[in-house]
Image (spheres, helix red, strand yellow):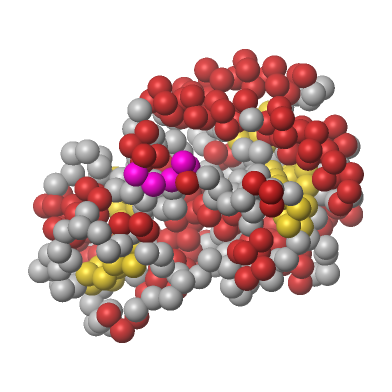
Amino acid sequence: MLFCVVPERGHVNPMIGPAQALRDAGCEVAFEARHDLTEQLSRAGLGTFLGGRDRGPAPEGNRGALFAERVRDPVWLRTWIRGLLVDAPEAEVEPLRAVLRAFRPSVVALDPLRYAAVLAAEREGVPWAALSNSLNPVLPEGLDSELLATVRALAPARDALFARHGARGAFRGCDALSPWLTVAFTTPTFVGREVPGVRQVGPSLPRGPRGDEAPFPWESLRPERPLVYVSFGSQVYHQPGLFRLVLEAVRGRPVDLALSVSELLGTDALGPLPPNAVAVRYTPQLQVLARASALVTHGGANAVMEALSFGVPMLVSPLCNDQHHNAFFVERAGVGVTLDPGLATPEAVWGALSTLLWDPGVRARAARVRESYRVDGAAECARLLTALAGGTLPAPG
């Protein structure tokens, strides 16, 4: 099995569990990405990495202060998305075909944003499965967003890219949909419906280390207090104003606060931390969510999936792209609250957090979704991939 992924944590982490399940079932598993993932894969017990080593880690231009500022500019963001989805794949198809010929996978399991991997698999006649780290495959008709408007504008160029390689793609949102197997790491309980042609298998969590764990000062937390966890992901994390907003909202309140702040740690960007707050560069997120009572998030798909797995309701302040879609699903399922990050006040943040922490309706709905997430989505995904490889997977319904 060859996993072709986007080398960012929110894209890689959901792939770790299925790859580990396949490994444990005796499959030979390898990863391919534009940039080096060797360190994380080795820590997760998935040592085979193909390609990308000579290009080093993912560029810093895809994260940090400048990136967080740029994604607020719709013109810049549309250009960046075009480069990622439409312009870059052309040069990657032939190198990927070479990887496929050398490794000879039975199935290519790919991030649906890796259009080059779709085209390479099509050209080499290898079945491919779309394993979505987002909720794009289950978007309802009628939902619109800036991202979906961008996708519509790029559709002619995208379709021309596929036509040049003799392929005709099917898409929902940004995601390429597979004629063999499309997986979404969610459940109909959260999404609200079954979606034809999409296997909603439940959450994708690792079996053992996923390779990005970090130490955490657990002794700073008080077990008798609710824990509010704050993280804005690994790309748009540079949000000093939002961190300060949450810090001010919980100052003197009967909760503990844990913040994942990346490069902001040790700077004066956050201001003085109140006694009930602890900030770290990077958290062991799954372990923190297992302890948390609420999550403050930008609405990244991986964070939403993991929070739901632990029944943690969310305060979502979407910043760009599919984060707005995820906020839509969270609000519609009644497992969280959305606040505009540009308009929120400390009082509004505390009011929202109070609802998440103590409203019995929100807690009950989050618990109901958690029950539906008590399935091993990684193992089910691995089972479907194995069935596809063995020719026993029924055609998508």
> Where residue 13 sits: x, y (%)?
57, 58
> Where residue 138 sits: x, y (%)?
55, 40
Residue 231 magenta-drawn? no
> Where residue 85 sits: x, y (%)?
60, 30
For the record, the magenta segment spans 61-65
- At 36% from the left and 39% from the top, the residue drawn is 66
- At 43% from the left and 29% from the top, the residue drawn is 77
In this rendering, is residue 273 above or below 219?
A: above
In the image, 207 versus 209, the foreground residue is 209
- At 79% from the left and 38% from the top, the residue drawn is 95
Give residue 20's quadrant in the image: bottom right
Q: Is residue 76 visible?
A: yes
> Where residue 319 sits: x, y (%)?
35, 40
In the image, 4 versus 102, the foreground residue is 102
Q: In the image, is 124 to the left or to the right of 46?
A: right
Name the chief secondary structure element in magenta: helix
In this rendering, is residue 110 above or below 119?
A: below
Quarter that holds the N terminus: bottom right
Q: In the image, is 191 to the left or to the right of 291?
A: right
- At 64% from the left and 53% from the top, the residue drawn is 36
Quarter that holds the C terminus: top right
